[in-house]
Amino acid sequence: MFSNWFIKVVLVILGVGCFCSSSMAAFTDFEDLSNGTTYTDGDSFTSNGVGFNVSGTKTLYVRSAPNSDFGSTTLVNGNVTLDFILTEIATEIEFDLGFYGGFMEIAINGKSTERIRSLSLLDGLTVGGVDIAISSASGGEPAYLTATGPISSFSFFGQETVMDNVSIVPEPATLLLTAAGGLALLKRKRV
């Protein structure tokens, strides 16, 4: 009923489609977490499919509407390190960030910043081969942090910080290899 060529095309399209769905950008606004939940050293949690590990001596809090500049549910960091669980290399990580005192550090690909005491000091830094940009850095107002480059590990330490709307964009190279393999299969000579 169907030719071999048609079946191969359908299988390649389905294979690439399945791969694409697992390699799409991940996003969480933490709305699936319960207000008042706390995370401490050694805890792991997932929000909308994005995983995190917590380390440090203090507490990470889930708060509903702690600040009108953010969404209705945010993470309030009180002296802990938040490790992003990356299942593949990312090309970009973005999130809303409020800084209200103390200091913060970012570690990317095994390299770390010094203690940073102002959002504006993050803007333009390169850490672990990844460029950091801050869209707004006036006092304690929220900013939009963007880290761009090949990211295999990312962690954030903060004192008196608020985080929301995390987006992680995966590397597209693997998708291209899958598509190229599918095209090679289609061009294979029939015996």
Image: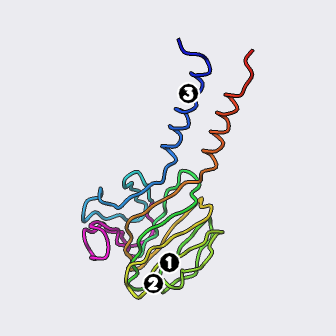
Location of mark 2 (residue): 137
Q: What whole-number distance in Å separates the C-alpha atoms at marks 2 and 3?
A: 49 Å
Q: Secondary structure at mark 1?
A: strand
Q: Are marks 3 and 1 in contact (CB under 8 Å)?
A: no
Q: What whole-number distance in Å separates the C-alpha atoms at marks 3 and 1?
A: 43 Å
Picture residue at 67% right of the left edge, 39% below the top: 180
Picture residue at 51% right of the left edge, 38% below the top: 17
Quick one: label 2 or label 3, which is nearer the N terminus? 3
In the rendered structure, the answer to whether residue 184 lies left or right of residue 83 reads right
Mark nearer the viewer, 3 or 1: 3
Location of mark 3 (residue): 11
Residue 150 point in image, percent of width and height: 62, 61
Which of 53 and 101 lies nearest the eye of the viewer? 101
Look at the image and tell me in which quarter the C terminus lies: top right
In the rendered structure, the answer to whether residue 166 lies left or right of residue 74 reads right
Q: Which residues are magenta?
A: 53-78
Location of mark 1 (residue): 134
Q: Per the image, is 56 magenta?
A: yes
Which of 54 and 147 lies nearest the eye of the viewer? 147
Q: Secondary structure at mark 3?
A: helix
Q: Residue furthest top?
A: 1
Picture residue at 48% right of the left edge, 43% below the top: 21
Quick one: label 3 or label 1, which is nearer the N terminus? 3
Q: What whole-number distance in Å separates the C-alpha atoms at marks 1 and 2?
A: 7 Å
Q: Are marks 2 and 3 in contact (CB under 8 Å)?
A: no
Q: Which amino acid is tagged 2?
A: Ala
Q: Are marks 1 and 2 in contact (CB under 8 Å)?
A: yes
